[in-house]
Image (cartoon, rainbow, N blue to C red):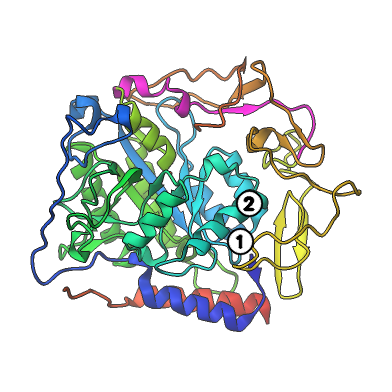
Amino acid sequence: MKSLSIVSSILLLMNAVIAQEGATVPVTSTPTTSTYSCDPNTCKIANNCFCASKTPPGGLSASDTPQFVTVTFDDSVQDALFKTALSMVNVTNPNGCPGHGTWFVSMEYTDFSLVQQWYAAGNEVADHTFSHVGTPSAQEISSCRSMLNAYGGIPNSKLQGFRAPFLNYTKDTLNILSQQSFLYDSSSSAVTEDTYWPYTLDNGMANDCWTGICAAGEVKLPGLWEIPMYSVLDNASVPQLMDVYLAGTPDNTKKWSIDAFNTHYNGNRQPFGIYVHPTHLTTYAGLPDPKDLLASVLELIQEIASKPDVWFVTNQQLLEYMKNPVKASELGSQAYMQCKQPVIPKEICNGLDDDHNGAIDDNLVNSCNFGNTSTKTCFNCPSTAPTLDNPTPASSIQNGTAGYRYPISDTCDTTWWDPIGNTCLCTTSDCQLKSIAVPKPNSTGSNGSNSNNTTNGKSDAGTSDSSSLNTSVTYATFTAFIAALLAVANQLL
């Protein structure tokens, strides 16, 4: 939710800059070792177990393996940040479907109507805690998930992923995720010797061993996946992780990233990640424009997207692939890589422009104001501002009275749910869907069906992202902090 308190906003921004949100991977003064061991003869995907490995899954050759790119965003969802994020996934996959990304959402400052729009467009929404704290409690994690469901309308079954704020996780964090039935964590870092494909934690952690988390018996969580965050080496061979564009000039950081991508692409095709806090790339009125930074990142993305067999996917789509690997030539026809939207004859509050008048959820979104806090949602406004202890307060409107919105059913997906009519518009196998795939010009890679036709088929709600630390704060990062700080003050004073 968006806070109007200047003091709290300043403190949050200061906290974010000081911690640097995992901008670099810690550099250890002594070599680290791992006791990780996994036998692929007994750890099989049929048993929801997968060993950490640098080679492509399913025994595929690298040349037959798709190159996945995961673009992820951290922290609150706000209008200006939302537009920046959309520009970064504005690519076309080889089968003609739009590229997608994953947003790890924290609750403070978040506009939940935009969370719903992000999901409805085919992207993934994931958990980043209620109040953005490192080593989060179980309540921090569950409260965030509850609000994403209640106010963002995201089905509980699709809230599967987690990233720890500041990438500050422990074995306790992973245990909480397992207890709360999350599908995956994506908080660990990968440099060169540990650039593994995603793997399950049946046999422990294989990344971030410098912390001691790889020690025997430290972590053993069957079925919980780890999606490593793949670093980029700068010109001093320092591994950069998040917001790489702040670590040097636009030309330099783009080159580092292209070099890192090519290492993956020309090697064993491990996924490549672009991990950002969109506030650094977003323009605020009256402040220095980061347009050169954004332009460089967009050029990087478009250059990568132009290569054969490159797919921009959510973390959930990546894990669907891990469970059933196929050749790049077959990927486009997989159900989880399709792009179909519901055909609905009237506008409902579902994050889409159902009546095609150019406005999403026009005149249907609720604005919720609590004096010093505000947000927007397609669902009921809470009677009081949500807190960590009470993330989903009672509705401000009573059930059965005019204006009441009904919570999403566990058996319905967001795009089919009418919260005003209390109806799931897809309950049979003949729901009308329209493909939004378009031909990809000059694509020489693999593809699947990209026909832009209307089809019948049930909406698939189950498929659809002792050491010394380098803690230096760069001038660019400090500048970004000042810009964000002034933006808050400019809006609130």
Q: Looking at the picture, does residue 368 appear above or below residue 42? A: below
| Residue name at image x 8 percent, y 69 percent | 30
Residue 222: percent from left, percent from top: 32, 42
Residue 346 included in the magenta stretch of the image: yes
Q: Nearer the viewer, residue 474 or 19?
A: 19
Outermost residue, left direction? 31
Q: Which residues are magenta?
A: 327-348
Q: Is residue 77 visible?
A: yes
Q: Which residue is mark 2?
A: 114
Q: In which quadrant will I find the N terminus?
A: bottom right
| Residue name at image x 57 percent, y 20 percent | 452
Q: Assess disc 1: are there few (<14), some (14-19) or many (≥20) residues with their C-alpha within 10 Å of its C-alpha.
A: many
Q: Quadrant of residue 168?
A: bottom left
| Labels 2 and 1 touching (C-beta < 8 A) | yes
Residue 125 included in the magenta stretch of the image: no
Q: Assess disc 2: are there few (<14), some (14-19) or many (≥20) residues with their C-alpha within 10 Å of its C-alpha.
A: some
Classify mark 2: helix, strand or loop: helix
| Residue name at image x 63 percent, y 35 percent | 413
Q: Is residue 27 left or right of residue 143?
A: left
Q: Amino acid at mark 2?
A: Leu
Q: In which quadrant will I find the C terminus?
A: bottom right
Q: Quadrant of residue 256?
A: bottom left
Q: Amino acid at mark 1?
A: Thr
Q: Which residue is mark 1?
A: 110
Q: Is residue 242 visible?
A: no
Q: Nearer the viewer, residue 392 or 27?
A: 392
Residue 245: percent from left, percent from top: 34, 62
Q: Is residue 179 left or right of residue 159?
A: left
